Image (spheres, helix red, strand yellow):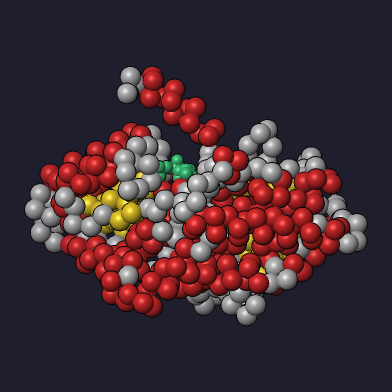
Amino acid sequence: MSNESLKYVPDAALKLLPAGRIGVLRDQLLSAAEETLKDVDLWQSGEPIPAAKQPLDAGFIQWPEELLADLQINRDKSLVARLEVCGDRLREAADSIVVLGIGGSYMGMRAMFEGLRSPYHNEQCRKTRGGIPRLYFEGWNVDSDQQQVLLNLLEQRADQHPDSIDGRTSVIVISKSGGTLEAAVAFRTFRELIERKFPKLAKSLIVPVTGDAGRLRNLSNAAGYEDVFSIPDGIGGRFSILTAVGLLPAAANGMNIRALLQGAADMTEHFRNAPFEENIVLQYVAVGHAFEMDLGMTTRVLSTWGSKLEAVGLWYDQLLSESLGKHERGATPLTVVNTRDLHSRGQQHQEGRRDKLITNLLPGRPHKPPITVPKHELDQDQLNQLAGVTMPRILQAAIDGTNKAYADEQRPTTDLVMPSITEHALGQLFQMLMLATVVEGRLVGTNPYGQPGVEAYKKNMQANLGIK
Ligand code: PA5
């Protein structure tokens, strides 16, 4: 693994397990990894999928490599090139882009936007943003007030800047099934706005991303939009971040989607080839499994150090919950942001029930020159003793202090260390967590694909509305 590779450091937690405990899991983990990879062959073979394996959404595993190979061979006709062209087109057509979608059709892009863009991106003027459009997310809830505020804002912009990019909005609507009510209702309202405000451009300003069949596909065919992208069969919603679901909005947002794919492909290669002791996917699964089985640690806290990574944690919350929360089993994920949540959840993590394994997600090198504490003639706050100390240094003191406090109380912590928050590192991280989730499912005999439990609320909601 290079300096730019994601690293997993479980040493502090391992002190709380008997020596050699992880090694004991080696054969079971290798066989779960083998099953995970054999599923890729099964999926690609086109043979009927045995009932016990259904649903099987193993397509995400080799997908990044396939897209990069397609790019090498087919160049400007490849899917990556077509996504980049469409992304450029949207970026040059509209200064606001709204992504409509929910669950796996939204959370990954949100994680990339918050991780890679300024936290105040949408507040900045177009020049400061380097011509990168503002990005908004809707259709991920049923909140009339919130949606109304955004509709009004976009309408005002259109009125204030008629015939200019500053007033224009584009919509990327994402739904694999094409029938999810939250996204579908939002698409109606935003489509109405786009068609009313930009009647001549509407077909190019709206881009659907959907499965090959379903209501959104039918609607797209009927509407004749300039671009429509497919979500391939065999890649489930929460595993779809590196399909057009995440790649199109990422490209429109000026992100390097080739680096994202390369990071993910590198992680798959590492997973396939690295020995058990160095394989960060397998080590991560082994540690989580051992603490759950041996010590009843059923809550997995992803402790993100910096709010830029909170949405990565929320994306992971969905991945773990929907994949393994079945048959009255499966660890409970919980994302925290520190140091913020040290002042809310920290008490419980330090002294509450002993059911938590804490994984620190560390962001690596900062992107901006660090802030230092200024000296001041009024020293009643007694901070002149810190004058000249950088904020990253203060954060490191908090990280080390928190880990020590947990270790002193035999509370297990591990570190997942990013080299820096870049497209390549995020690609690695997403792929690592998706692979780990599937391997853990195979390890404990839970099919990680599909989410039958989500259907019950949908059925009741539709019945309550009289929807057929
Ligand atoms: O993982 C999944 O498949 C789900 O969480 C979906 O992403 C979510 O329900 C949204 O579905 P769709 O993309 O079909 O609108």
Q: Does residue 117 sit above or below 73 in this rendering?
A: above
User: What is the x, y in percent for residue 54?
Assistant: 54, 42
Q: Nearer the viewer, residue 159 or 75?
A: 75
User: What is the x, y in percent for residue 16?
Assistant: 87, 56
- Would residue 49 be seen by someone viewing this image from the given angle? yes
In this view, the residue farthest toward the bottom is 2
With 259 as the anchor, is 25 left or right in this view?
A: right
In this view, the residue farthest toward the front is 47
With 159 as the anchor, is 127 left or right in this view?
A: right
Q: Nearer the viewer, residue 50 or 347?
A: 50
Q: What residue is shown at x 22% (from left), y 42% (from top)? A: 219
Image quadrant in which the C terminus is located = top left
Q: What residue is shown at x 36% (from left), y 45% (from top)? A: 175
With 455 as the anchor, is 316 left or right in this view?
A: right
User: What is the x, y in percent for residue 225?
Assistant: 19, 52
Q: Quadrant of ligand 1?
A: top left
With 62 as the anchor, is 395 left or right in this view?
A: right
Q: Nearer the viewer, residue 340 or 291?
A: 291
